[in-house]
Amino acid sequence: MHILPDTDLVNLCNEGNKHAWEELIHRYERLIFYSAIRAGADPGEAEEIFQNVSLILLKNLKRIRKSLSLGAWLITVTRNECKKYWNSKQKDDKIETAVQDQGISDEISPERLAARAEDERAVRQAVDLVPEPCRKLLLLLYFQEEKLSYRQIASKMHMPINSIGPTRRRCLEKLKNILLDLGWAESE
């Protein structure tokens, strides 16, 4: 399987290639989601922020020239969307608490955060430490070549479809704690 560089994917997206867009979103899905989590969003908020960031990326594809720093750009956009999200919901003090609790500051460059967030090995190591059935659920949700629907996941997990969201939230919290224990989110 040939993996296209971001520059090529962005160019294909600008030409209207649907598969390139899906690949680009798949490539940066976890980076955006975990950037929101690291900024203090809960998983439900992170999902909404992910959607907003994806729309912003889509709207700005034609203007993106330096795709080599796409990850850093997405982290900056995600941070801004977190702030907008909380401001719109009157959660100003939540972002301050998250910044203090997570040791996140504007002094940490987006490039450094991108390099850490893209460290697939550390995340995979943490997933391997998550107890069953969370490990299985996380693998089905985030580590499959082909994106599975909630219906397919519910069938494979032998659980009601409406239990996946709350279970995923708890499993992501366990994963977050393991990543923190492994030093993944230590301040620089």
Image (cartoon, grey):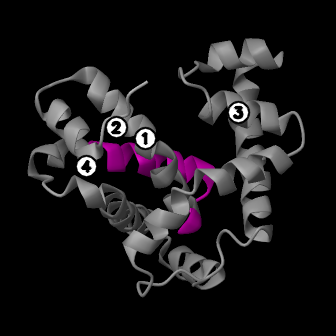
- Label 4 residue SS: helix
Tell me if residue 23 comes above or below residue 31 in the rendering. above
From the viewer's perspective, is the residue at label 4 or at label 1 nearer? 1
First in residue order: circle 2 vs circle 4: 2
Residue at the right extreme of this rendering: 131
172 and 41: which is toward the camera = 172
Q: Callout 4, which amino acid?
A: Ile
The span from disc 2 to disc 4 (Cα, nearest Å) is: 13 Å
Mark 1 element type: helix
What's the mark number on residue 24? 2
Q: Secondary structure at mark 3?
A: helix
Task: Nearest to the eye among marks 4 and 3: give it.
Answer: 3
| Residue 177 shows in the view | yes
Judging by the rendered image, the residue that carries numbered circle 3 is: 139
Picture coordinates of residue 171, whole percent (x, y): 77, 45
Quadrant location of residue 23? Answer: top left
Contact? badges 1 and 3 (CB < 8 Å): no
Residue 56's tag is 4
Kindly identify the amino acid type of the residue bearing the numbered disc 1.
Answer: Arg
Q: Distance from label 1 to label 3 (Cα)?
A: 16 Å
Of the two numbered discs 2 and 4 in the rendering, the one whose residue sits closer to the viewer: 2
Q: Upstream in the sequence, badge 4 or badge 3? A: 4
Query: Can you say which quadrant of the picture contains the C terminus?
Result: bottom right
Q: Which residue is mark 1?
A: 27
Report the magenta residues as a range. 38-55
